[in-house]
Image (tube, rainbow, N blue to C red):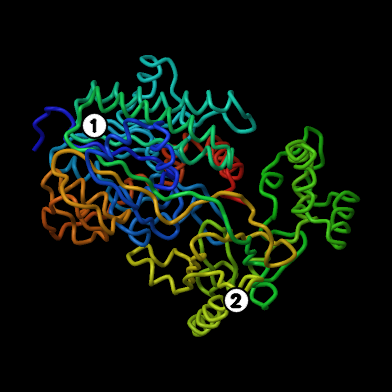
């Protein structure tokens, strides 16, 4: 039980951090506080899961279970061919701080992704990534208190479209907000456990790839806050962890739906209700007075004619971006015109498709599961086998295999939510190839982004209870390890183990399955509770989707 004598354990989350990024900064003397933790403790790679993306990996970290149990596989949750942005209500397993609360320990949690809206537990929580800009916190009214005490608190930096000193200033501002908020709440609630996450260590690579000076500035700001937190909170044990690594692409862009179309699995259409190839324009709104009817007359016919001769929105987007007019076009081009000019994956007419690149896999259009499924259940395994054999043999133009693994989803996911995963998991070789769900005109091209996620993140452990070496660490191991630091056995349901540098506390059979919120069956109340009302929900989802698009997660 709690002795309320300060932090017994602190987890510091650095999104996208990995040794190839940290070690040059250590050598340059830029990160004295993080480097000191490494010197006092142990450090090594922390293997992420598949898919190694923020919205799925952080829930895996703070629950200790794979996505087949906690239920979040992507930035989006799907209902048939439609989607919604995920949030904390989609996580079906208890969070670490909820498990500790049930055993009498309190927590302060700041900026951890996919925690909005927060559940009930002993302590305080300020949601992070995937939350709206003014999220509901726990306890109620906490955000107003923070803003009154600190002057400002935001979830996201205002860094999109700005560079240089302005971008650095924004990154530094939100980094300081995280540190200030955590120290304020630790003083106010006197918790046993703390968890603070810094997202800008990943965002800077997506918004400013290759700008080493800006990366260093972001990490220096984070290191400064780490030092202040350690000094003020004096935790007994510290874990620094990341959800994945990051690095440059050395391979190709592989347009999986184009490949599937070439082999007769994915159907392609021009116009209609398939998957658009330019999300920012698709999500744009019409100018006041523009015709919003389905029949746009000459403009729609002109766009369709352009598409017939290969001038798709993908190509148009690249051209407009090059001359600085892409955002302008997104505001003024009617949605129906864009759809008419797009080559799209026709979901209902396809046998198989990649629904979104961040899912790292292929979905079969199965009868009885998808709204317009075409593959009979009795042919499901046959089609899966065909596709696995086909994809395992895909080679780059140089003759190298594109995938290090192509497997049935059962090889990566198990649990009550596993049937919501892709049917076939595709793991790019060393994550050096950029998988895309867009239609590009050919299967191989240059990567769509210069930097992106890698499988290995980082783990650093220091302080009381840390001894030995850090070997074979996995993202699933973080929650069992923190529980062990409190003498709490891990659940037999958890997929992780206690890190090798910490003594285990055994395991017991107890459920970590989170019950659905009591209001989940009342759709109106569910909308109001999750998003603040249906009207607000639409705006928030669009805002978050546009942010994810700008970072390259959605296409």
Which residue reaches farthest front?
A: 27
Percent coordinates x, y for residue 133 in the rendering: 49, 30
The image shows residue 452 at horizontal and vertical percentages of: 53, 50
Tag of residue 371:
none
Say few, some or many: other residues with alpha carbon within 10 Å of mark 2 (under 14 / 14 to 19 / 20 or more): some
Q: Nearer the viewer, residue 12 or 115?
A: 12
Residue at the spot of label 1: 123
Q: Is residue 349 visible?
A: no
Secondary structure at badge 1 equals strand
Apparent side of residue 321 relative to residue 121 in the rendered image (left or right): right
Residue found 58% across the figure and 65% down from its top: 354
Location of the N terminus by quadrant is top left
Q: Quadrant of residue 254?
A: bottom right
Give the numbered dot on residue 374.
2
Taking 69 as reference, is 345 left or right?
right
In this view, the mark in front (1 or 2):
1
Identify the residue at horizontal 49%, vertical 29% (top origin): 217
Element class at badge 2 = loop
Q: Is residue 334 left or right of residue 491?
A: right
Q: Nearer the viewer, residue 333 or 49?
A: 49
Which residue is pictured at 38% across the width and 67% down the height? 412
Q: Residues within 10 Å of mark 1 (few under 14, many from 20)?
A: many
Location of residue 45 in the rendering, given as x and y in whole percent from the top left corner: 34, 52
Does any portion of residue 286 appear in the rendered image?
yes
Q: Earlier in the sequence, mark 1 or mark 2?
A: 1
Which residue lies at the image location 24% right of the left edge and 37% below the top edge?
Answer: 121
Total marks drawn?
A: 2
Asked if residue 134 is positioned above or below residue 395 in the image, the reply reads: above
Residue 166: image x %, image y %?
A: 59, 23
């Amino acid at each position: 039980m709690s002795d309320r004598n300060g932090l017994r354990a602190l987890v510091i989350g650095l999104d996208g951090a990995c040794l190839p990024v940290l070690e040059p900064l250590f050598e340059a003397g830029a990160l004295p506080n993080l480097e000191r933790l490494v010197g006092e403790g142990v450090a090594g790679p922390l293997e992420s899961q598949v898919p190694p993306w923020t919205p799925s990996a952080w829930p895996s970290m703070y629950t200790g279970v794979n996505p087949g149990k906690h239920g979040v596989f992507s930035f989006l949750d799907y209902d048939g061919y439609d989607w919604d942005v995920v949030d904390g209500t989609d996580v079906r397993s208890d969070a670490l701080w909820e498990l500790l609360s049930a055993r009498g320990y309190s927590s302060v949690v700041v900026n951890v992704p996919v925690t909005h809206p927060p559940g009930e537990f002993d302590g305080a929580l300020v949601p992070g990534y995937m939350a709206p800009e003014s999220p509901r916190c726990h306890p109620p009214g906490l955000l107003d208190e923070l803003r009154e005490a600190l002057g400002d608190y935001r979830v996201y930096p205002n860094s999109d479209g700005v560079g240089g000193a302005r971008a650095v200033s924004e990154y530094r501002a939100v980094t300081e907000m995280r540190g200030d908020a955590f120290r304020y709440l630790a003083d106010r609630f006197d918790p046993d456990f703390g968890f603070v996450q810094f997202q800008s260590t990943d965002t800077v690579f997506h918004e400013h790839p290759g700008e080493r000076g800006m990366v260093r500035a972001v990490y220096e700001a984070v290191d400064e806050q780490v030092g202040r937190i350690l000094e003020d909170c004096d935790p007994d044990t510290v874990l620094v962890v990341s959800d994945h690594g990051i690095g440059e692409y050395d391979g190709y862009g592989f347009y999986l739906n184009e490949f599937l179309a070439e082999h007769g699995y994915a159907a392609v259409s021009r116009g209609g209700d398939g998957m658009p190839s330019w999300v920012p324009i698709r999500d744009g709104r019409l100018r006041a007075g523009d015709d919003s009817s389905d029949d746009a007359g000459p403009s729609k016919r002109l766009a369709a004619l352009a598409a017939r001769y290969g001038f798709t929105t993908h190509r148009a987007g690249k051209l407009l971006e090059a001359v600085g007019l892409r955002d302008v076009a997104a505001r003024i081009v009617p949605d129906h015109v864009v759809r008419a000019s797009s080559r799209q994956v026709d979901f209902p007419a396809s046998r198989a498709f990649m629904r979104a690149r961040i899912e790292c896999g292929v979905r079969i259009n199965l009868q009885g599961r998808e709204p317009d499924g075409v593959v009979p259940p009795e042919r499901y395994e046959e089609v899966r086998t065909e596709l696995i054999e086909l994809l395992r043999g895909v080679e780059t133009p140089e003759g190298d295999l594109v995938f290090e693994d192509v497997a049935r989803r059962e090889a990566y996911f198990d649990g009550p939510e596993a049937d919501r995963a892709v049917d076939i998991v595709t793991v790019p070789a060393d994550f050096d190839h950029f998988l895309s769900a867009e239609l590009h005109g050919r299967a191989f091209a240059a990567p769509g982004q210069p930097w992106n996620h890698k499988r290995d993140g980082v783990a650093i452990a220091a302080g009381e209870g840390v001894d030995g070496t850090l070997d074979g660490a996995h993202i699933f191991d973080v929650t069992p390890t923190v529980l062990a630091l409190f003498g709490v056995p891990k659940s037999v349901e958890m997929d992780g183990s206690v890190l090798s540098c910490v003594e285990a506390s055994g395991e017991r059979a107890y459920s970590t399955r989170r019950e659905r919120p009591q209001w989940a069956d009342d759709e109106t109340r569910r909308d109001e509770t999750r998003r603040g009302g249906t009207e607000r929900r639409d705006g928030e989802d669009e805002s978050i989707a546009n942010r994810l698009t700008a970072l390259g997660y959605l296409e």
